């Protein structure tokens, strides 16, 4: 079978192209168009969730055909891991907010002013994305990439994971470098250390709930 003949490097490239090629293209296109208003409406959320569902399903089929198992990724659900995810969310938000404010005070630049988020979601699109996106991103951006490249060492695996996450969020503008990049590094480092995926999913889901809730006052 052709899939079984793929080298580990070819598999890594193929999975990332399938999972993040479309999202990276959308992100980079929007960055280059210099959007100043980031509209999060139902159409946008359905599009992201649809891409992730289709790409994720294809990628999982490929990984299963190549002998990967769910247990390889450390996806185990428990109350202590759920609490750990909440702690991770709180601690990371405090750390990123502190880092951001320090950067703004030192440089006199406010990267957040370059874009304005506008929330116009529906509950159905919001809940669908909240169910799909945390699993998809943390499974493939973090767990798969780190497991697939762990032989190259922590620095390479963590950097790869963080850079892919950043590329997929470049549309957010300059603020992505001060928020998404450190988040990606911390998430990848946490997974490298403990090899537990559920806390990352919980932290991501909580962040998504507060960030894209249809009742959000943004916009």
Image (tube, helix red, strand yellow):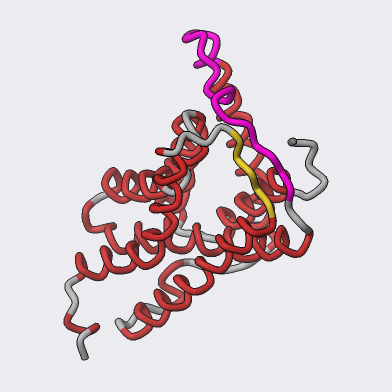
Q: Residue furthest right?
A: 215
Residue displayed at 63% across by 32% down: 116
Percent position of residue 170, x then y: 44, 40
Q: Is residue 79 left or right of residue 104?
A: right
Q: What residue is at 58 percent from the left and 60 percent from the top?
A: 133
Position of 123 relative to 159 (above/below)? below
Which stretch appears magenta?
Answer: 102-120
Q: Is residue 136 left or right of residue 126?
A: left
The x and y percentages for residue 132 are 60, 65
Residue 111: in magenta span: yes
In this orientation, does residue 188 appear? Answer: no
Tell me the quarter of the image containing the C terminus.
Answer: top right
Which quadrant is home to the N terminus?
bottom left
37 drawn magenta: no
Residue at point 28%, 57% (across, down): 150
The x and y percentages for residue 37 are 61, 35
Relative to residue 122, is residue 92 depicted above or below? above
């Amino acid at each position: 079978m052709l899939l079984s003949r793929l080298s580990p490097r070819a598999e890594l490239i193929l999975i990332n192209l399938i999972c993040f090629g479309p999202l990276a293209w959308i992100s980079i296109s929007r960055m280059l168009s210099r959007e100043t208003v980031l509209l999060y409406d139902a159409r946008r959320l359905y599009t992201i969730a649809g891409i992730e569902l289709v790409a994720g399903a294809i990628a999982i089929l490929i990984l299963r055909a190549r002998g990967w198992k769910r247990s390889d990724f450390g996806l185990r659900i428990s109350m202590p891991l759920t609490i750990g995810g909440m702690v991770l969310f709180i601690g990371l938000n405090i750390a990123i907010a502190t880092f951001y404010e320090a950067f703004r005070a030192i440089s006199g630049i406010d990267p957040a002013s370059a874009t304005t988020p506008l929330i116009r979601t529906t509950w159905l699109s919001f809940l669908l994305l909240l169910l799909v996106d945390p699993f998809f991103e943390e499974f493939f951006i973090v767990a798969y990439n780190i497991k697939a490249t762990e032989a190259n060492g922590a620095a390479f695996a963590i950097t790869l994971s963080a850079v892919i996450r950043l590329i997929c969020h470049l549309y957010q503008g300059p603020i992505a470098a001060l928020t998404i990049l450190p988040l990606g590094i911390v998430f990848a480092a946490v997974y490298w250390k403990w090899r537990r995926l559920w806390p990352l999913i919980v932290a991501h889901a909580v962040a998504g709930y507060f960030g894209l809730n249809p009742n959000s006052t943004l916009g």
